[in-house]
Image (cartoon, helix red, strand yellow):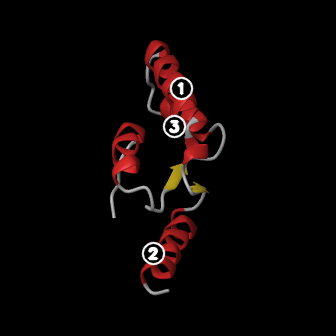
Amino acid sequence: ILDIDIEGFKQVRPVYPDLYSIFVMTPPGEFERRLRERQTDETEISRRLKSAQAEIAFANQYNELLINDEVERATGVIVDRIDQLFHA
């Protein structure tokens, strides 16, 4: 089990083509809301949103997209997937 960003995924996928991958993301608008809540400056918000958009555009390369709208639910989905993959 690896917790890696897109650049790491791009390196690992060719080596392990059968790996099962889950792209975890915040609900739409949540990332920007969190940045603004932390009083991140506008230049940094713009840079990070642009980076996030590029990552989201790559999400279709993953086996599954998981919206982390509730930590308990998202964790449950990941645990269920691990159970399915390793105990099938």
Q: Which circle marks residue 34 in the picture?
A: 3
Residue 70 lies in quadrant: bottom right
Identify the residue at horizontal 45%, vertical 87% (top origin).
Answer: 87
Left or right relative to 25: residue 39:
left
Distance from Cα at disc 3 to Cα at disc 2: 29 Å
Disc 1 designates what residue? 49
Residue 82 lies in quadrant: bottom left
Identify the residue at horizontal 57%, vertical 69% (top origin).
Answer: 73
Decide which of tag 3 and tag 2 comes sooner along the chain: 3
User: Which image quadrant: the N terminus?
Assistant: bottom left
Distance from Cα at disc 1 to Cα at disc 3: 11 Å
Query: Please, what secondary structure does the residue beneath circle 2 have?
Result: helix
Distance from Cα at disc 1 to Cα at disc 2: 30 Å
Decide which of tag 1 and tag 2 comes sooner along the chain: 1
Q: Amino acid at mark 3?
A: Arg
**Seen from this angle, which residue lies furthest bottom?**
87
Residue 36 locus on image (x, y percent)? 52, 28
Residue 68 locus on image (x, y percent)? 56, 55
- Vertical order, 57 against 51 (above or below): below
Disc 2 designates what residue? 82
Q: Amino acid at mark 1?
A: Leu
Q: Amino acid at mark 2?
A: Ile
Residue 18 locus on image (x, y percent)? 45, 62
Left or right relative to 13: residue 62:
right
Residue 54 lies in quadrant: top right
Badge nearest the viewer, 1 or 2: 2
Q: How packed is label 2: few (under 14 Cα within 10 Å), some, or many (20 or more)? A: some
Decide which of tag 1 and tag 3 comes sooner along the chain: 3
Identify the residue at horizontal 42%, vertical 81% (top origin).
Answer: 86
